[in-house]
Image (cartoon, rainbow, N blue to C red):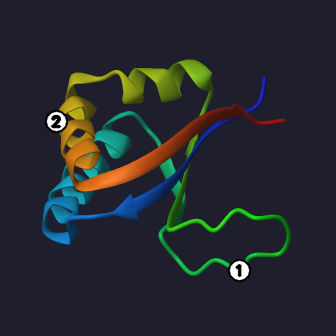
Amino acid sequence: MGNAYVIADIEVLDAEAYEDYKRLSTAAVERYQGRWLVRGGAVAELEGDWHPHRVVVLEFDDEQAARRWYDSPEYAEAKAIRQRAARSSMLLADGV
């Protein structure tokens, strides 16, 4: 079984509150052994009509580890802040 990836497209609406999200989410990701692969850097559209805002990709050892992070009490506060401060689309994908 391969790693699992959380892929998000985030449109930040409240930059100040989003800074709180980043601080809290960083601690939660580290606690659950997640690894940041992409965290809001520049993107180039190659094909299609997807125009992302802020792309984030996290890697976890497997789907269960990613779900433990996402459902954890450590991430709950961060998630609530993100849901108020941004519009988000988020996926969990199995790796190869």
Left or right side of 41 for 69: left
Residue at image location 44% in from the left, 57% down from the top: 10
Residue at image location 50% in from the left, 50% down from the top: 35
**The disc label shown at residue 44, or none:** 1
Left or right side of 49 for 5: left
Could you say whether the residue bearing mark 2 is in a helix, strand or loop?
Answer: helix
Residue at image location 21% in from the left, 47% down from the top: 84
Residue at image location 27% in from the left, 38% down from the top: 79
Q: Position of residue 8 (x, y in %)?
A: 53, 50
Could you say whether the residue bearing mark 1 is in a helix, strand or loop?
Answer: loop
In depth, the one of 84 and 95 nearer the eye is: 84
**Quarter of the rendering containing residue 81:** top left
Q: As displayed, is residue 41 above or below residue 75?
A: below
**The disc label shown at residue 5, or none:** none
Question: Label 1 sits on what residue type?
Answer: Ala
Q: Position of residue 70 (x, y in %)?
A: 39, 29
Q: Quadrant of the N terminus?
A: top right
**Numbered disc in front, either 2 or 1:** 1
Give the residue pinned by disc 2: 77
Question: Label 2 sits on what residue type?
Answer: Glu
Viewer can see residue 60 = no
**Quarter of the rendering containing residue 52:** bottom right
Viewer can see residue 14 = yes
Between the residue at mark 2 and the residue at mark 1, the CA separation in whole angstroms equals 32 Å
Q: Quadrant of the C terminus?
A: top right
Mark 2 is surrounded, within 10 Å at the Cα level, by few (under 14), some (14 to 19) or many (20 or more) other residues, namely: some
Q: Farthest residue toward the front?
A: 49
Task: Choose the circle earlier in sequence order: 2 or 1.
Answer: 1
Left or right side of 67 for 79: left
Q: As displayed, is residue 91 above or below residue 36?
A: above
Mark 1 is surrounded, within 10 Å at the Cα level, by few (under 14), some (14 to 19) or many (20 or more) other residues, namely: few
Tag 2–tag 1 contact (CB < 8 Å): no
